[in-house]
Image (cartoon, rainbow, N blue to C red):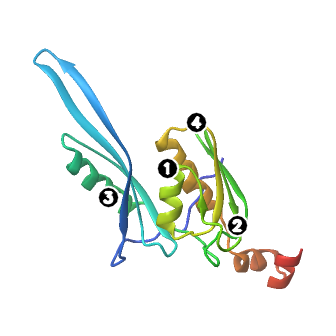
Amino acid sequence: MAKNTFNRVKAGDLELKEKVVAINRVTKTTKGGRTFSFSALVVVGNEHGVVGHGLGKAKEVQEAITKGIDDAKKNLIKVPVMHGTIPHDQLAKEGAAKVLIKPAAHGTGVIAGGSMRAVLESAGITDVLAKSLGSANPHNVVKATFKALGLLREPIQVAKTRSVSLKKVFNG
């Protein structure tokens, strides 16, 4: 299967907002006792179509979140947002997690579960219907949501690819 190259974006001087999706405490038992470490799954976005996710691991929670934010800034993608919603339906799978996202009418709001909601709100999508099918593992749900958002295409791009007018793309 061909590797998809999503619309990557450089962090540069974007004003990004962070959301912590999940924090996991890991315990390692050694001869000297228990050692705790933390991993943090973080989503960042500018709420205008740019979003990224990252994972940070450290001995302290705050340090793990900081590392996660730095990792998320390296994985930013551009998402096509039209009038607060997405251009078309999209289904994506990552591991055992499947994600279905559909455009919604203005005023619907973000109808999505926890991990998906964080990603969609960070991307600046205000009206969308989303369903997480299969696994509820936050890591895989976030990755599947990113895959779905990365596969979205703008109507202008579709019109150019098909060599038809924009009106024909919308009306069939």
Q: CA distance from mark 3 to mark 2?
A: 30 Å
For the residue carrying disc 1, how many other residues have a C-alpha within 10 Å: few (<14), some (14-19), or many (20+)? many
Q: CA distance from mark 1 to mark 3?
A: 16 Å
In-image side of 50 versus 148 (left or right): left
Please tell me whether mark 4 sits on a helix, a strand or a loop.
loop
Which mark is first along the chain, 1 or 2?
2
The label shown at residue 172 is: none
Residue type indicated by callout 4: Ser
Q: Residue at x 58, y 36 (%)?
A: 135
Name the residue carrying label 4.
135
Residue type indicated by callout 1: Ser
Q: CA distance from mark 1 to mark 4?
A: 12 Å
Closer to us: mark 4 or mark 2? 2
Which mark is first along the chain, 2 or 3?
3
| Marks 2 and 1 close (CB-CB < 8 Å) | no
The label shown at residue 69 is: 3
Please tell me whether mark 1 sits on a helix, a strand or a loop.
helix
In-image side of 84 versus 76 (left or right): right
Which mark is first along the chain, 4 or 3?
3
Name the residue carrying label 1.
115
List x then y, in percent, for residue 67: 27, 53
In-image side of 92 versus 10 (left or right): right
**Location of residue 62 with respect to 164 vertically, above or below:** above
Closer to us: mark 3 or mark 4? 4
| Marks 3 and 2 close (CB-CB < 8 Å) | no
Residue type indicated by callout 3: Ile
